[in-house]
Amino acid sequence: MIEVKGFSKKYGKLTVLKDVNLRIEEGSITAVVGPNGSGKTTLIKSMLGLALIEEGEIRINNHALNSECSYRRDIGYMPQLSRYPDNLSTRELLDMLKDLRNTREDLDEELIEKLDMVKEMDKPTRNLSGGTRQKVSAIIAFLFSPKLLMLDEPTAALDPVSSSYLKDKIIKENNRGKTIILTSHNMNEIDELSKNIIFLLEGRVFFEGMVDELKKLTGQENLERAVANLMKGSVS
Amino acid sequence: MNVSIKISRYQLRDLLRSKVLIIYTAFFFLVTYCLFRFVGDTSKVVVSLMNIILIIIPLISIIFGTTYYYNSREFIVLLLAQPINRSSLFTGMCIGVSLPLIMGFLAGVGIPLVIWGAVTLHDIDTVLMLLFSGALLTFIFVAMAFFISVANEDKLRGLGISLLLWLLLSVVYDGLVMLAVVLFADYPLETPLIVLSILNPIDLARVLILLKFDISALMGYTGAVFQKFFGSSFGMLISLISLTFWAAISFAMGMKFFKNKDF
């Protein structure tokens, strides 16, 4: 379970997140949505300890985040942008992470085959295309069967086949009890995957609840229109 | 510590395949080879090598370190999302970038030296001092590069500051010393010049090598002052300690910023 209490984040003078309060239950899929620059990535990075916590509190499984790093053992993270050491192959990259985590067993390497990466494993990563790099990040995120997955726009650069495999994987892992947090701009995808939604606007939580609730509230059947209505409502 | 070693091991594997490093090694190889072919005398070769090393090592180390950091930003984020603490990662990266550069330098200079150099017992100390100073300078300038890049979000700005720092320490500095000597010829300059020298790791390395060499004619102004003021061995000790301080301070500053950075 993740609890965020009174969390604010500033970069210099720019306030990115303002007094965010959230609760994400174990075993749920939660989508974080919002316009560009609304603070989605910052929220995820704060939960990972990448952005430092200065005001407020974030607790993961009742464990307040500080500089301690062992809680990240249970987290798989798929960043929005990825780039790896130029001259290492994907295989060496995965070896490096296994070495760093000291984990060689219970690895989930299903995605290597599913995302059609077997033949790319020995190429230096500098020769990989943007989409292929994103596949590598997906493989890394799921590799250690973490209890909590944070996926920052996981399907943005993927082709439709890979994207659908990845979505299947997300649903499968969730059925096994994994907690999943993802961001996306594709509302159909969110509608397909997640039951919970957090809508961020200018650094504040504008809506937090079930996707169905949001649809009912705005009287729209389609999530994209529901969110659009929500945004328009906020403007007027 | 264990984690740092693992990180640097994979970085080493990555960088030993990089073209820049191969060119860097080949450059030192070629220069050393040519010097032996055309100059011959080992002490003269060492002095010429020193002058090249004192310019090239800081330049390449600081530029390579800076570009490497900025190109690795996304990867650093990925590594920080693993159960790794920031100080292990920073230590590992500093070692992982300076080690391949040091290896390239040692191989590039060392191989021709062993093959073509007639190294006498007297020269071997100087040669070792040259190699050691080069290695230490590499680490200092990689650590400075990391400090600059961690502190500056913008890549161009970071690169600019790195270049400027190199220019200041290797070119402008010599001019400043000359100017001071000419302008204030009537005043006692020893103390200010020693302070100035301690503030410049490149000059410290030069003083260290030349004091070992013990040829006053090549000493340059600050070297001569060091010798006059402290004598050869004490002067070497002082410059060595100051260089170590430079390494420690650059590393510690980078680490401090790295620990408090928002990624």
Image (cartoon, coloured by chain):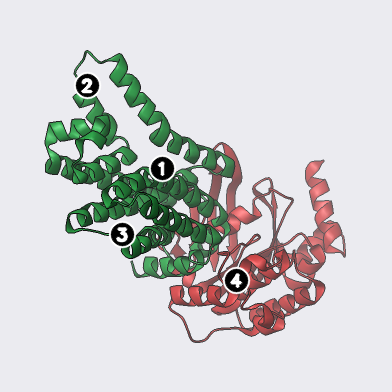
Chain colours: A red, B green
Count of numbered circles in the view: 4
- Residue wearing tag 4: A149
As helix, strand or loop, the secondary structure at mark 3 comes to loop
In the visual, does B149 lie left or right of B192?
Answer: right
Q: Quadrant of the C terminus of chain A?
A: top right
Q: Amino acid at mark 3?
A: Gly
Q: Position of residue A144 (x, y in %)?
A: 54, 78
Which label number is shown at residue B55? 1
Q: Residue at x 67, y 77 (%)?
A: A120
Q: Position of residue B212 (x, y in %)?
A: 19, 46
Which label number is shown at residue B189? 2
Q: Position of residue A184 (x, y in %)?
A: 73, 62
Chain to which the residue tagged by mark 3 belongs: B
Q: Say above or below: B63 vs B110.
A: above
Which numbered disc, 1 or 3, marks the residue that appears first in the sequence?
1
Q: Amino acid at mark 4?
A: Leu
Which label number is shown at residue B117? 3
Disc 4 to disc 3, C-alpha distance: 59 Å
Q: Quadrant of residue A189?
A: bottom right
